[in-house]
């Protein structure tokens, strides 16, 4: 056995063993890389320099701004305003809260850029409302978890920044942002259609139109004379199951629109600013962060300035985890390149089959499997240097931006799947359900996500059309 072979076994095998032993990903990467470098005789000074270079990139400045923006949005209770807007649009129909769940994630995902933030913020409001109205608890949690995956696709998404850096820095972050918009919206509408088609199977209750922004109450309440009434199989319990869209006061409707549109202007700032070339992705992140700060603390006044230190503390904690992961993953990727692991994997995959469709299918199955056991950010840092040369080879000829969207979409499925799906864990905690029962209710939703993944994989225009128009 050659030294390079032994170093490869230690690098990959040691990393897997450490993960199985539940060593944190950052330390697993660092220990496996260090042991492999010592065996291979790699200069450790080079490894340290790689780690420093990994976190010295100017584009990384966008990540703390996006994280801070998400924290500010969370304490500012923006989710309530997004839910009110979604309720205004689709809340009147049968199964209205299920449709609200799909649409509010589409809106909020474009603000927070985080699936976990989506579940914890929107879920704490929507799940209790759905359960109180008569939806199955596990279904409510599962739908909230799956729809939250739009957050990592619809810009802003710090995972796209991580991918652009892992790919070597030659990929435009702005193009990645724009490319994720259509796939993210496509996922949201696919889940919406899923709910509409199966509304009778799941026995969705009628839509509720209580008055904009009011909580659901199981009592008999006033409604316009032309509203329809339904009996909900509970003694003395009546709810409005159908009313015209604008039965509320026009002033209240306008107030809901203003309250929701102001937060969503962050999407316009980021996508519009980057797409028009007014500022870079990093500058757009800083401006959007400052905008959300003014909105939360001075316009809506839903948070107090004296608590801003707690927001900064949470941001720094998250940022420390992300940057340490990026640093160690950079060293890990350098060691893989030094041992020619990506080239060997490319040769092996091409030797298995030269059929483009089968190669992409194999890559997707591999990513789906890995995504069930690892979090998104480390997988992006580890798998991008390995798979990018494969997909951009003449055998496949895939655009790097198209591959980036496919990769992030694929790993977003992993956020919802046991045993280590972070969004699934948070959703079960918020909704007070078990992992097993919720996963069973999510099987049909998983099928929808896989269908969307296949479409995005084999139809490049879903990812590349909008960037080609904007840029």
Image (cartoon, rainbow, N blue to C red):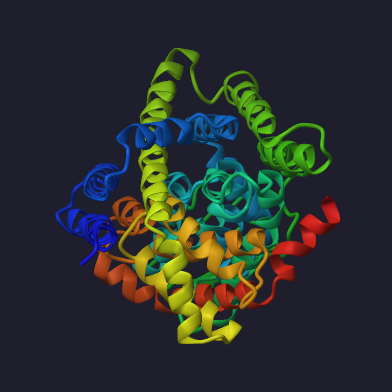
Q: Does residue 12 appear to the left or right of 190 in the view shown?
A: left
**Residue in view at x 14 percent, y 55 percent:** 21
Residue 302 drawn at (x, y percent):
53, 26
Residue 147 drawn at (x, y percent):
51, 61
Residue that lies at the very extreme toward the top in this rendered image: 306
Task: Name the quadrant of the N terminus.
Answer: bottom left
248 or 268: nearer the viewer: 268
Give above or below for 34 relative to 337. above
Residue that lies at the very extreme toward the left in this rendered image: 21
One can see residue 144 in this view: no
321 or 292: nearer the viewer: 321
Q: Does residue 366 appear to the left or right of 63 in the view shown?
A: left
Give above or below for 114 relative to 207. above
**Residue in view at x 25 percent, y 56 percent:** 7
Residue that lies at the very extreme toward the front in this rendered image: 2
One can see residue 396 in this view: yes
Q: Does residue 228 appear to the left or right of 327 in the view shown?
A: right
**Residue in view at x 18 percent, y 52 percent:** 22
Q: Quadrant of residue 372?
A: bottom left
Give above or below for 132 relative to 230. above
């Amino acid at each position: 056995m050659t030294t390079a072979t032994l170093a490869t076994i230690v690098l990959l095998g040691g990393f897997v063993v450490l993960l199985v032993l539940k060593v944190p990903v950052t330390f697993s990467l660092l220990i496996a890389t260090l042991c492999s470098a010592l065996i291979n005789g790699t200069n450790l000074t080079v490894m340290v320099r790689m780690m420093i270079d990994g976190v010295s990139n100017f584009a990384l400045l966008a990540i703390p701004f996006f994280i801070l923006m998400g924290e500010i949005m969370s304490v500012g209770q923006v989710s309530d305003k997004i839910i009110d807007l979604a309720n205004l649009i689709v809340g009147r129909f049968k199964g209205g809260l299920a449709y609200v769940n799909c649409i509010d994630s589409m809106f909020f995902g474009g603000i927070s850029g985080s699936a976990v933030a989506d579940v914890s913020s929107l879920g704490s409001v929507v799940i209790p409302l759905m359960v109180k109205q008569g939806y199955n608890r596990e279904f409510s949690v599962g739908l909230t978890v799956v729809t939250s995956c739009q957050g990592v696709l619809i810009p802003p998404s710090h995972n796209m920044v991580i991918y652009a850096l892992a790919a070597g820095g030659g990929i435009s972050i702005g193009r990645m942002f724009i490319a994720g918009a259509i796939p993210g919206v496509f996922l949201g509408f696919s889940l919406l259609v899923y709910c509409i088609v199966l509304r009778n199977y799941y026995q969705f209750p009628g839509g509720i139109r209580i008055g904009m922004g009011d909580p659901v109450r199981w009592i008999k309440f006033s409604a316009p004379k032309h509203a329809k009434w339904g009996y909900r199989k509970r003694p003395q319990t009546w709810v409005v199951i159908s009313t015209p869209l604008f039965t509320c006061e026009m002033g209240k409707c306008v107030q809901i629109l203003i309250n929701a549109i102001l937060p969503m202007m962050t999407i316009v700032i980021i996508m519009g600013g980057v797409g028009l070339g007014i500022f870079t992705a990093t500058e757009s992140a800083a401006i959007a962060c400052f905008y959300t700060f003014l909105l939360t603390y001075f316009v809506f006044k839903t948070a107090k300035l004296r608590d801003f230190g707690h927001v900064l503390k949470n941001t720094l904690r998250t940022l420390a985890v992300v940057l340490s992961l990026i640093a160690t993953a950079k060293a890990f990727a350098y060691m893989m390149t030094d041992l020619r692991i990506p080239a060997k994997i490319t040769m092996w995959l091409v030797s298995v089959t030269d059929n483009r469709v089968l190669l992409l299918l194999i890559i997707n199955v591999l990513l789906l499997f890995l995504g069930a056991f690892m979090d998104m950010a480390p997988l992006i840092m580890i798998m991008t240097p390995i798979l990018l040369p494969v997909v951009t080879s003449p055998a496949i000829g895939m655009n790097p931006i198209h591959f980036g969207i496919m990769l992030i979409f694929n790993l977003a499925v992993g956020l919802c799947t046991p045993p280590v799906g972070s969004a699934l864990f948070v959703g079960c905690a918020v909704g007070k359900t078990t992992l097993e029962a919720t996963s069973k209710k999510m099987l049909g939703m998983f099928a929808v996500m896989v269908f969307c993944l296949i479409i995005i994989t084999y139809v490049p225009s879903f990812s590349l059309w909008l960037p080609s128009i904007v840029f």
